[in-house]
Amino acid sequence: MGEDNLQSHPNWNAILQWSLRFQDEPSENRVLEPLDQERREFLMRAFEDYAAMTEDPVKSMRRHLEVIKNPASSKEDCVVALEEIAFHAEDIDEANDLYLMGGLQVCCAYIKHYDPELQSLACEVIASAVQNNEKIVQFASETFVLSDLLKLVDTAQHEMVRVKSLLAVSCLVRGNKGALDKFNELDGCNVIVRSLQSPVPKLQLKSLFLLSSICLDAPDQCKVYNSMGVPQQLFAMCSKFSTEDHTAETHDASILITLKLLHTLAIHSKVDFPHDALTTFTTLRDSLGGDRFKEERTFCTLLIKLRPPSTDGVDR
């Protein structure tokens, strides 16, 4: 709390001073006594001050919704409002309140907004609201929301819009069979495979994470992604990783998720290993030194063991 706030709320200042004095006193000298009436009234006034300073979440969301519903609101005001709504939506009860008051539907309309920053923030609201919330997952799956999010992932011109829309798709689909079925019905598989080919590192990483989650949750999907050529993309990425310098921490997450996903695909579907797989995984494993790459080295070894035996003397 800033100094100005302490000065404007003397009860808080008094509590701070009392707390500091109490902390300075040796524990063996402290004597705990029942609060007398004066102290009790002092603390009650302090708590009342705090309550007055804290806005009810529902009232706060309603106030911010009025801002984004008003065509005359400035972009700056809408940005602040969506940020605050996204913060509230992280709490499952407040996310339910947002949905019940029709506010989530208002926010979802913003994913079609012409401004990329407002689109991105609307995606953040959805990503926060759907997590561990079956009611909102069902709403997002059965309405235009999932379809529009996938369109943004595939075709949005602004990089951040693609990243945030993919985040929302990932939060919606992971661990939700109904949402995954709708995702597949909407050709989400091809959308994610295309985003995996993106030169944007954040988009590529989130695509890897979503594909890995889908294949772990629903192993039957592995055959689908194998038939779409995903293992070949992953082998190419591993080959590239094997030629890079890994003294920095830039690509740690990408390497691990790539290896894990490739391992999952190889276990649950018949993956064709390229002829240079042994060299690629051995070189990559040897380039990943130190404890922070221990798990990556383990997956390199596992993938080496999964290679089919060579029948023609060629490295496989």
Image (cartoon, grey):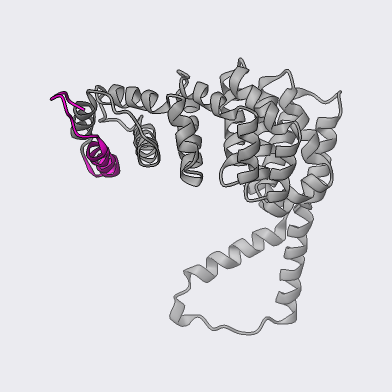
Q: Quadrant of residue 306?
A: top left
| Residue 281: quarter of image | top left
- Residue 171: x and y in percent read 59, 40
Q: Residue at x 46, y 44 (%)?
A: 216
Is residue 147 visible to the viewer in this orientation of the structure? yes
Identify the residue at the far left of this view.
313
- Quadrant where the image shows the C terminus: top left
In the image: residue 264, left or right of residue 127: left
Q: Residue furthest front?
A: 311
Question: Residue at image x 47%, y 81%?
Answer: 29
Nearest to the observer: residue 16 or residue 226: 226
Horizontal placement of 263 versus 286: left or right?
right
Residue 313, placed above or below residue 215: above
Q: Residue pushed farthest top?
A: 157
Q: Which residues are magenta?
A: 290-316
Residue 174 position, x and y percent, is 56, 43
Q: Can residue 209 be seen in this snapshot?
A: no
Horizontal side of residue 316 vs 125, given as left or right: left
Q: Give x and y (percent) for residue 286.
A: 18, 33
In this picture, residue 164 sits left or right of residue 299? right
Q: Nearer the viewer, residue 270 or 219?
A: 270
Please tell me whether residue 17 is drawn above or below residue 231 in the rendered image: below
User: Residue 40 magenta-drawn?
Assistant: no
Q: Nearer the viewer, residue 215 or 77?
A: 215
